[in-house]
Amino acid sequence: MDQSASFFDPSNKKAAQLREQCAMETLDDLLDYILNGNGSVGIFDATNSTLARRKQIMERIRERAGPELNVLFVESVCKDPTLLESNMRLKLSGPDYDGKDPVAALEDFKQRVAIYEKNYIPLGDYEEDNNMPFVSMIDVGRKMISHQVRGFLAGQAVYYLLNFNLSPRMIWITRHGESVDNVAGRIGGDSDLSENGRKYAKAMTRFIGRQQKAWEVHQADKVANTHFPPIAGDHTPPNPHYSGDIQPKNFCIWTSMLKRSIQTAENFCDEEYDIKQMRMLDELNAGIMEGMTYEDIRIKHAEEYERRKRDKLAYRYPGPGGEGYLDIINRIRPVIVELERMTDHCLLVTHRSIARVLIAYFQGLKREDVADLDCPLGMLYQLEPKPYGVEFKAWRYNAVSNDFDHLPDYKLRRATTLNN
């Protein structure tokens, strides 16, 4: 199907009718998912640039769902011309223009924007007069306008947009090095690193330092080879975060409050890295079973062992302080918001349950997959937020070379035993 600028021209009656049909069928699918399926939140991703379209959307939602279903319109406006040009260039790396000549693609997208702009009616008076909740984000967060935002989820959406940024950066996630309790097979606790764990910590410090320098060289090269307007063969999109020159980024190291995590990061120089300990990154608390092996639990707490086996996600360890994965998901929500907000590099040296939740979030996995995600010791995960998703890389510690091997074909998978 032709999706050039002419497809989005309102004077193209055939294309306009097709767009309206697609929009309403998609909206009905979304409402089926919420009203008849197991969905609770839906995102209707369309331009919705005319007042008539927004009225049509609200009428269809109220017709099918009544007044109980909350609706929040989200508008993104770019007024800064440099930012707008950069955002247009970012669009070239998206699915609409994948593999197409960047010069022709940029020209086509500018025509599409001009068509939208000619017919666009911003959110404002009509929505206010008709009590329609909305949030308007101007110049990627330079200014925010919200109207009648109510409820937890809508408030969280606005909070996320307030902390949204396009800054290129690296997020690294790893478990601590091997601990004395890992060797003994005990869960929880607060033991020191083993000798192997200390070797891992030193190798990781060296490796992260090398990767940081290589990343800075790569970013400087991208900026040096980005052209306005693009030239043939130039597929490197500029980032709106940059104003022209590249400054070295701050690098944060976050650990839990437990010794094995703190010791894994102790080789980083505190003059070069911003090192902090956070209790939110502590391992899942096993309650009365802290310090036990899974075999001990199977023998001494057979009923609890079976309960956990049936549903690891919903299971909570009994006793004072006992937690489950649902508790961990709630506990680290502020960490995730901060990772979305910050423009610095960050390495999180944490524990299996925390690493599982963080990786699942950035990879867009289902909540049901979190508790069984394979996340062994010796793995270092690299995530780089991009305009269209998160670039994911995995590295495995090689004890023979005392360095890290890149795993280009690495796939996240389920743990193979209950004890994981």
Image: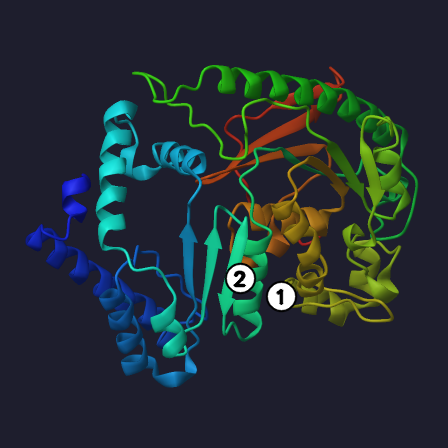
Q: Is residue 353 above or below residue 166?
A: below
Left or right side of 227 for 308: right
Q: Residue furthest left?
A: 14
Kind of residue indicated by mark 1: Asp
* Front residue (pair 380, 121): 121
The residue beneath circle 2 is 157
Local SS, label 2: helix
Kind of residue indicated by mark 2: Ala
Foreground: disc 1 or disc 2 = 2
The residue carrying pointer 1 sits among few (fewer than 14), some (14 to 19) or many (20 or more) residues within 10 Å by Cα, namely few
User: Disc 1, disc 2: CB below 8 Å?
Assistant: no
Alpha carbons under labels 1 and 2: distance apart: 30 Å
Q: Residue at x 53, y 62 (%)?
A: 157
* Front residue (pair 138, 365): 138
Q: How is the image coloured?
A: rainbow
Q: Residue at x 50, y 19 (%)?
A: 222
Q: How many marks?
A: 2
Q: Residue at x 72, y 24 (%)?
A: 208
Image quadrant containing the N terminus: top left
Q: Splitting the image into 4 quarters, where does residue 345 fall?
A: top right
Q: Splitting the image into 4 quarters, where does residue 5 fall?
A: top left
Q: Residue at x 73, y 37 (%)?
A: 377
Q: Is residue 117 above or below residue 345?
A: below
> Which is more N-terminal, label 2 or label 1?
2
Q: Position of residue 308 (x, y in %)?
A: 69, 65
Left or right side of 163 for 331: right
Q: Position of residue 201 (x, y in %)?
A: 82, 28
Residue 101 seen in the current view: no
Local SS, label 1: loop
Residue 85 seen in the current view: yes
The residue beneath circle 1 is 311
Q: Which mark is residue 23?
A: none
